[in-house]
Image: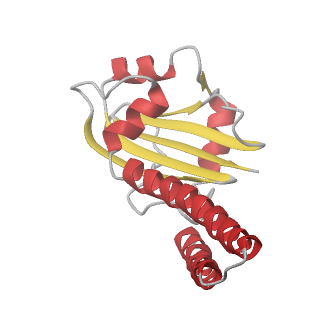
Amino acid sequence: MAFIFWGLVAFVGLIIWGWTLSAFLTSRLSKSRTLRWLGAAPFLLCSLIGGFFAIAMASTFIASDNPKTIFAQEFGFAPPSDVKNLNSSYYWFGDSGLIYLKFQAAPATIKRITGKKFALLNTSQTAQEKSGFPINFSSDIPAWWNPQPASGLQIWKGPNSDSFSTETTRLYYDKKTRWAHYSFEGGD
């Protein structure tokens, strides 16, 4: 849904850019120096804004295609050799950000990830979190991101990055299967 919205924004931006281009080209035919500047200014401004938008969207798409990059960005180190079956979903633009990771890892890697920044939820908090399964923080959750309530499931609450006014960070880890599910959702 977010891609449709930003696609429409890009389409409208292209229409406005085309209009400013035609105004710029028309102004070049004029002998008046003022009209030339009035034609050039909107075209240059629109081109700069469009270029910034294109770079921002391209970086989002490039980052979302590389799970190892997302893992390193979120946890501060590259995935060690015990991390297997790594999947990621990444969307970050404007006033919202969504990151989902799913992977298998040894308990030592989970300990390294959680360190001092994550807090293991106690039994009553874990029961409360499990009662909300299946988790549905957002409509943009990938189909493969599906932590299952199990007796060995540990739920860690992660730190807020202060990038957004509302943030939720969770790491679900099943000791038996060694599957980890990480989510970050932020919005203003």
Question: Which x, y percent locates residue 166?
Answer: 75, 44
Tell me residue 35's x, y (percent): 73, 76
Q: Position of residue 62 (x, y in %)?
A: 37, 52
Which residue lies most toward the left here? 81
Q: Residue placed at 36% from the left, 21% from the top?
A: 109
Tell me the quarter of the image containing the N terminus.
bottom right
Judging depth in this view, the residue of 124 and 34 nearest the camera is 34
Q: Which residue is located at x 44 percent, y 60 percent?
A: 142
The relative height of residue 4 versus residue 98 in the rendered view (above or below) is below
Q: Is residue 143 left or right of residue 44?
A: left
> Where, by quadrant of the figure, is residue 7 drawn?
bottom right
**Residue 50 occupies which quadrant of the picture?**
bottom right
Indicate whether 119 appears above or below 142. Answer: above
| Residue under the image location 64 percent in, 78 percent down | 20
**Residue 59 horizontal side relative to residue 170, left or right:** left
Q: Looking at this rendering, what residue extends furthest in the top direction?
A: 116
Q: Residue at x 38, y 45 (%)?
A: 102
| Quarter of the view holding residue 121 | top right
Q: Residue furthest front?
A: 31
* Residue 118 appears anywhere in the view: yes
